[in-house]
């Protein structure tokens, strides 16, 4: 039986801004530990367990891992879409003067890592399928590191990193839509388009009951799942139709839904995703495993490409007069944030699953090794730079 003091400790932990990032780290660590013990066959058996839903002749039958990656992650993308819409309407991204710097950083942080990966894998058409893996940033991990640094981190640092990550997520969505789709079923895609039309009408009528939107969104998710377009895009599409304001209530349906989803996404969906995807076995691995062009390209893209791309494009935007450093941020702070952007854990794992795990090719490498290694180095470097260059009284 849990006593009141334990409950209070748990409550205080869950209220901390760093809690989601810590839970992600713990989930990933547990998966890695299990994958390197005699428990690994059971772990493998768990994520490969077939799960089926059937109504008449209609059936969805997938391994548990794909239900997590295609289903639960659609909810994650829904929340990303809600956050993006709010920021564009009322948040930091509603001020065009504040968009330039994170937009420049996000562009460089996607282009240069992809270029690093390409440079190491240009001789293999199969390997080039993973070019987008190092282009992603994990906002939960990166913000978690900032929170661990405490009061020495100005609020403007967190706002800048969050804004950059939003643009990064939008870029990831575009990449998934354009480059990681199977053969298209026009019939299923037509059903998804019909769902969008219904959602548009509901939006124009300012319907405040978000459960109706979620029901239509579920139908759209199934349609996209059957269409060949990646089903997680249903989450982003649905978010764009959720009304920000409604004449039927003083509350914002968009913000209400975002607040309802946030705990489930942060404390359940992302930790489950991390546990299901981070189980890398190091048994029998040598240095040659990391030096394989694919994991090496991913690690180089995250650790080297991210910091160069983000910092370089931000520096260029500032020098050309398109943007300015956020209040309280010096060049050293910008470089520390740029390094933290190399933590690509969640989205990198997600894209790697689209790039390689569903190809059916017998692989002799593990791309997750590059993701873990590159993210770890980026986190350590970013933390160290900010720890050394920021003073506790710099918080604003």
Image: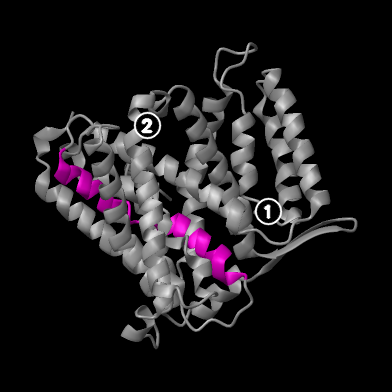
The numbered mark, 2 or 1, whose residue comes first in the sequence reads 2
Which of 146/121 is in front?
A: 121
At x 60% / y 75%, what residue is drawn?
A: 45
Q: Is residue 354 magenta?
A: yes
Query: Which residue is the site of mark 2?
Result: 99
Who is closer to the viewer here, 16 or 80? 80
Check disc 2 and report its element: helix, strand or loop.
loop
Q: Is residue 365 left or right of residue 54?
A: left
47 horizontally vs 139: left or right: right
Q: Quadrant of residue 64?
A: bottom right
Callout 1 environment at 10 Å: few (<14), some (14 to 19), or many (20+)?
Answer: many
Mark 2: give few (<14), some (14-19) or many (20+) Cα within 10 Å: some
Q: Which residues are magenta?
A: 330-358
Q: Main secondary structure of the magenta part?
A: helix
Q: Are marks 2 and 1 in contact (CB under 8 Å)?
A: no
Q: CA distance from mark 2 to mark 1?
A: 30 Å
Say the numbered circle drawn on residue 37: none
- Residue 261 in the image: state x and y as whole percent: 53, 38
The residue sitting at 38% across, 73% down in the picture is: 120
Does residue 29 appear anywhere in the picture? no
Identify residue for label 1.
229
Q: Position of residue 289 (x, y in %)?
A: 38, 82
- Horizontal placement of 335 versus 6: left or right? left
- The answer to whether 124 is drawn above or below residue 340 in the figure is below
Secondary structure category for the residue under label 1: loop
The colour scheme used here is one colour
Residue 29: image location, x then y, percent = 37, 65
């Amino acid at each position: 039986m849990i006593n009141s003091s334990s409950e209070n400790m748990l409550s205080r932990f869950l209220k901390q801004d760093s809690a989601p990032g810590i839970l992600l780290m713990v989930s990933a660590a547990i998966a890695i530990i299990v994958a390197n013990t005699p428990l690994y066959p059971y772990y493998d058996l768990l994520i490969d367990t077939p799960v089926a839903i059937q109504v008449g002749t209609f059936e969805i039958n997938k391994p548990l891992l794909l239900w997590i990656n295609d289903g639960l992650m659609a909810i994650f993308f829904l929340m990303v879409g809600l956050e993006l819409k709010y920021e564009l309407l009322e948040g930091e991204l509603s001020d065009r003067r504040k968009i330039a710097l994170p937009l420049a950083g996000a562009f460089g942080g996607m282009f240069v890592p992809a270029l690093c990966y390409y440079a190491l894998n240009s001789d293999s058409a199969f390997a080039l399928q993973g070019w987008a893996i190092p282009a992603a940033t994990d906002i939960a991990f990166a913000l978690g590191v900032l929170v661990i640094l405490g009061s020495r981190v100005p609020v403007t640092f967190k706002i800048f990193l969050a804004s950059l990550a939003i643009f990064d997520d939008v870029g990831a969505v575009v990449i998934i839509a354009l480059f990681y789709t199977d053969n298209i079923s026009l019939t299923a895609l037509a059903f998804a388009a019909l769902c969008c039309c219904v959602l548009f009408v509901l939006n124009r009528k300012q319907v405040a009951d978000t459960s109706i939107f979620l029901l239509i969104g579920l139908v759209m998710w199934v349609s996209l799942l059957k269409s060949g377009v990646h089903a997680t895009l249903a989450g982003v599409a649905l978010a764009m139709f959720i009304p920000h304001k409604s004449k039927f209530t003083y509350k914002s349906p968009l913000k209400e839904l975002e607040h309802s989803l946030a705990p489930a996404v942060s404390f359940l969906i992302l930790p489950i995703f991390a546990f299901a995807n981070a189980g890398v076995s190091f048994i029998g691995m040598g240095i040659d495993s990391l030096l394989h062009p694919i994991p090496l390209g991913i690690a180089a893209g995250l650790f080297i490409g991210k910091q160069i791309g983000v910092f370089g494009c931000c520096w260029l935007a500032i020098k050309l007069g398109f943007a300015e450093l956020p209040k309280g941020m010096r060049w050293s702070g910008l470089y520390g944030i740029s390094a933290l952007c190399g933590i690509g854990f969640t989205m990198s794992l997600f894209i790697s699953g689209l790039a390689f795990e569903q190809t059916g090719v017998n692989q002799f490498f593990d791309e997750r090794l590059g993701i873990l290694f590159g993210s770890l180095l980026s986190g350590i470097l970013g933390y160290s730079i900010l720890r050394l260059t920021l003073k506790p009284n710099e918080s604003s």
